[in-house]
Image (spheres, helix red, strand yellow):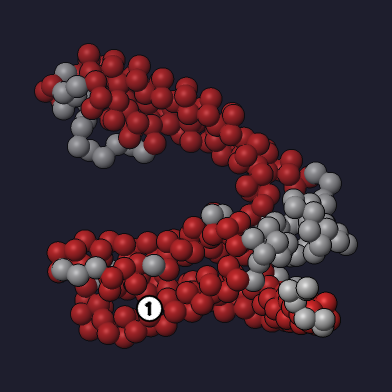
Amino acid sequence: MPIFPKDYKFGKRKLKIFLLKESKKHSGWRNALHEVIYEADTPLGKLFDVVLVALIVVSVILVMLESVKEVDEVYHQVLFNLEWIVTIFFSFEYVARIISIKKPWKYIFSFYGIIDFISTIPLYLSYLFAGSQVLLALQAFRLLRVFRILKLAKFLGEASQLRSALKASRTKITVFIYVVIVLSIIMGTIMYLVEGDEAGFTSIPRSIYWTIVTLTTVGYGDIAPQTNLGQFLATLIMILGYGIIAVPTGIVTVEFSRQKGAPKIHTNTQVCPSCSAEDHRDGAKYCYDCGDLL
């Protein structure tokens, strides 16, 4: 004797059709949301990006104004209310980015996903923990909102070329930094032997600190050589510093020129709705990373 009624197969078919329709409806609004948030080649996508950039700039300005005591004392409540408005918008944006892609963890654990989370939660944290001392410590977390400015890198057209240039230069820059460190250790040790405690060179680490500061600037004045030999060595280090500063700039500039001179592969703003991969070629139908349909 059958366990299910005779029209079980018919009911199962209707259930499949219903679930398929609901899935299409869900994917329809989710795709529409994805187009607005992740794409920049549609009117709504451009408008969303413009509003997002404006709010990021406003948020960073608010953080700066709150740090000015004179301004904060007079306009504290206004700044606080404006920050809540911005925070609520970024909260909705964060949730929308998660639900509009098939693999949300790809966004959550991405660089910009982490930045979005870090820069959104500080205002909420101040209400989750009780105790005045804890709240005073949590005020430091509010400064993390300034990380929103890192999101602006998404909207810079040359950002990808600069990233590629830095990546291509990393070996040369690493070797250069190693040489600078070795040079600083040697010169710092010599200055410690030449000057001694009387001039402020009380230890080799402190002398190395003075050498690095002198290489990158002209010193802070907290430590200064007193002997003629020490002043002569300091002069050489200062002159050497001008040449050292130019080296990494030249390395990155050369690689950046190569990136610009290389044959350009035309890409668009299409973002994969499954894995959030970017920079797809014009006319591409499938994602180069996960193979899903764009």
Q: Which residue lies at the image location 68% right of the left edge and 76% below the top edge? A: 30
Reply above or below: 209 against 79: above
Q: Quadrant of the N terminus?
A: bottom right
Residue 140 placement: quadrant: bottom left
Q: Which residue lies at the image location 39% right of the left edge and 67% below the top edge? A: 121
According to the image, label 1 marks what residue? 83
The front one of 138 and 289 is 289
Q: Pinpoint residue 200: horizontal percent, then vertical percent.
A: 16, 27
Q: Which residue lies at the image location 57% right of the left edge and 79% below the top edge? A: 51
Residue 154 placement: quadrant: bottom right
Circle 1: residue type: Glu
Q: Residue furthest right?
A: 283
Q: Residue furthest left?
A: 198
Q: Quadrant of the C terminus?
A: bottom right
The front one of 81 and 21 is 21
Reply above or below: 219 against 11: above
Residue 146 placement: quadrant: bottom left
Q: Pinpoint residue 208: horizontal percent, then vertical percent.
A: 30, 25
Reply above or below: 16 against 101: below
